[in-house]
Amino acid sequence: MFENLSERLERSFKILKGEGKITEINVAETMRDVRRALLDADVNFKVAKQFTDTVKTKAIGQNVLTSVKPKEQMVKIVHDELALLMGGDASKFDVSGNPAIVLMSGLQGSGKTTFSGKLARKYKSEQGKRPLLVACDVYRPAAIEQLRVLGEQIDVPVYSEPDSKNPVQIALNGIAHARANNLDLVIVDTAGRLAVDAQMMDEIEAIKKAINPKETLFVVDSMTGQDAVNTAKEFNDRLDFDGVVLTKLDGDTRGGAALSIRTVVNKPIKFVGRGEKLDAIDVFYPERMADRILGMGDIVSLVEKAQQEFDEKQARELERKLAKNQFNFNDFLDQIHRIEKMGSLKDIASMIPGMGKALKDVEINDNAFKGIKAIIGSMTKEERANPDIIKGSRRQRIARGSGCDLQEVNRLLKQFEQTRKMMKAATSFKNNPMQMMRAARAAQKQMGRR
């Protein structure tokens, strides 16, 4: 997402490269290019005009410090305005109450049912909530079954009445079931349509009035661009929802919905979905998204993702093993699993400043670890725990068992040993800067000989 917009904005800022100061002429030229970039990204034309006019007004006449170049000054102004355009600060999601009731709304195919499962999983695992999913889509034949399967995957109960065609009563009965079973978060999944119609809006309004939800979310497929914004406006006019969920941000979307929807409906984006996996859900942070649009990465989100998978106790144990050269394939496999849980490899890499642009045309296969896991899976318990014993005949057996070439097994073992040595060295150097410097000089000399 936003790759094309990021590239276009970078080109726009080049107009200011080499300029001594920001002037009305060079700002106007830059803003014309920025507006074109926003329109190409499918941003609402009124939003694009208002945005560029605001940036132009703020930029003209600003005194550029000697330590700050005009281009850098403009990037800062655009960054701040992008963050404001998308809402400024992250919006609070209220799950207080017993039970807290969340009503999901949106068109068919927007990812509403899948997102209901993601939301239940998030609040169960992160806040210890006891969720209940309520199936109120009485029209789509597979809707109840889809929600039931999602519930099984995340170990969350699902309330449904397959023989009923009254979604209002189903929702009320589901809430009563939650109270009777001490469940404190009820997520009501409602029916969608292929387009907005009077029957659909009357029904969702009736459900909202009957259950009085703490939060009403509008789920929208971000790949539909301005159509998503128009649909959000129609829903909001009738439903007055509390926030927006943007799904499929990992797809081929230009980003116009994310940049337009907050201004058009005056409601915050609360969550984003980045794929089909049930852990692919993020709180929406406007400032972090602005960082990513301008190619600055998103280190804060990357650190948060890492912290969810790595705790301090595990890190200390890993450091102890490295120091004693006891790091083995069990540890190696555990690290791979933790990295995979953090999400798409390309998405993770794009959070590192500068990497988004560098990886624009690079394909990163999310199955990159598949061969490595197959090789480790073909090892015995003894071999995983003691990699040094894996010699000739063992390597051949592992190759046959994993379906890989012997060369691939040899390559992995060599890389593993190099990694182990490097990590052990880094651990021993941590409290000895002089030793680290000597090692760095020795490595430079070695590279020079080559």
Image: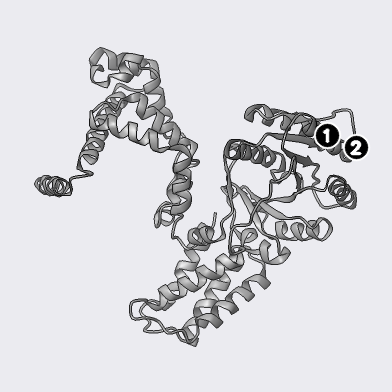
Residue 350 visible from this viewpoint: yes
Residue 366 or 342: which is nearer the viewer? 342
Percent coordinates x, y for residue 324 in the rendering = 23, 28
Q: How is the image coloured?
A: one colour
Q: Secondary structure at mark 1?
A: helix
Seen at 34% across and 17% down, the residue is: 398
274 up-or-down from 125: above or below:
below
Displayed quadrant of residue 313: top left
Q: Are marks 1 and 2 in contact (CB under 8 Å)?
A: no
Residue indicated by mark 1: 176
Seen at 65% across and 56% down, the residue is: 269
Seen at 50% across and 68% down, the residue is: 79
11 up-or-down from 338: above or below:
below
* Crowd rating for badge 1 (residues with CA inside 10 Å; few <14, some 14–19, many 20+): few
Q: Which amino acid, mark 1?
A: Ala
Q: Which amino acid, mark 2?
A: Asn
Q: Earlier in the sequence, mark 1 or mark 2?
A: 2
Percent coordinates x, y for residue 321 in the rendering = 28, 29
Q: Is residue 310 left or right of residue 168?
A: left
Percent coordinates x, y for residue 363 in the rendering = 44, 44
Q: Which of the two marks, 1 or 2, is nearer to us in this view?
A: 1
Residue indicated by mark 2: 166
Percent coordinates x, y for residue 413 in the rendering = 27, 26
Q: Quadrant of the C terminus?
A: top left
Q: Is residue 425 left or right of residue 83?
A: left
Q: Quadrant of the N terminus?
A: bottom right
Residue 360 visible from this viewpoint: no
Displayed quadrant of residue 404: top left
Q: Secondary structure at mark 2?
A: loop
